[in-house]
Image (cartoon, helix red, strand yellow):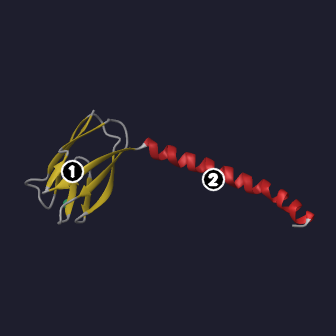
Amino acid sequence: MSESAMLSMTKNTGPMLIVLSLLIALSFVTELAKAETLEVELRIRDHLFFPSTLIIPANQKVKIRVINEDPTPEEFESFELNREKVIAAHSQTVIFIGPLEVGEYPFFGEFYPKTAQGVVVAK
Ligand SMILES: [Cu+2]
């Protein structure tokens, strides 16, 4: 490598280092944002919800990961939470709820409402 080529490489590392540190800073911010939203799991199995009572903190946005283990689709439905979402067979989805006031918010599976019953308890 010629001396001038080495010199230009040294010159070019400045902006590259800035870009690199910005990328690192950005990934930290992204991690922080992720950590702020609490995630809870809700499973559907044999047309039942597990857990059927989902306890979450009040006054906070919560991410519910709904995992449908059944070979049939189900629809998460709640009038109190104003949410309605179909989860295909053997698949999962994410539903954001809250921030909620302290209280109980029933939900059910619209396709199997006789068995698929649950309640979100915000405390
Ligand atoms: Cu519905």
Q: Which residue is mark 1?
A: 79
Instruction: List x then y, in percent, for residue 42.
Output: 25, 49
- The secondary element bearing badge 2 is classed as helix
Real-space Cα separation, disc 2 to disc 1, in angstroms:
42 Å
> How many numbered tags mark residues here?
2
Residue at 26% across / 59% down in the picture?
85
Query: Callout 2 environment at 10 Å: few (<14), some (14 to 19), or many (20+)?
Result: few
Q: Closer to the camera, 36 or 82? A: 36
Q: Is residue 30 visible?
A: yes
| Res 91 quadrant in image | bottom left
The kind of residue on which mark 2 rests is Leu
Q: CB of residue at label 2: within 8 Å of ligand 1? A: no
The kind of residue on which mark 1 rests is Phe
Residue 24 is left or right of residue 7, and the answer is: left
Instruction: List x then y, in percent, for residue 18.
Output: 73, 52
Q: Closer to the camera, 9 or 31? A: 9
Q: Which residue is mark 2?
A: 23
Q: Does 71 sit above or below residue 57?
A: below
Residue at 32% across / 35% down in the picture?
58
Question: Mark 2 vs mark 1: which is more N-terminal?
Answer: 2
Q: Name the quarter showing ligand 1.
A: bottom left
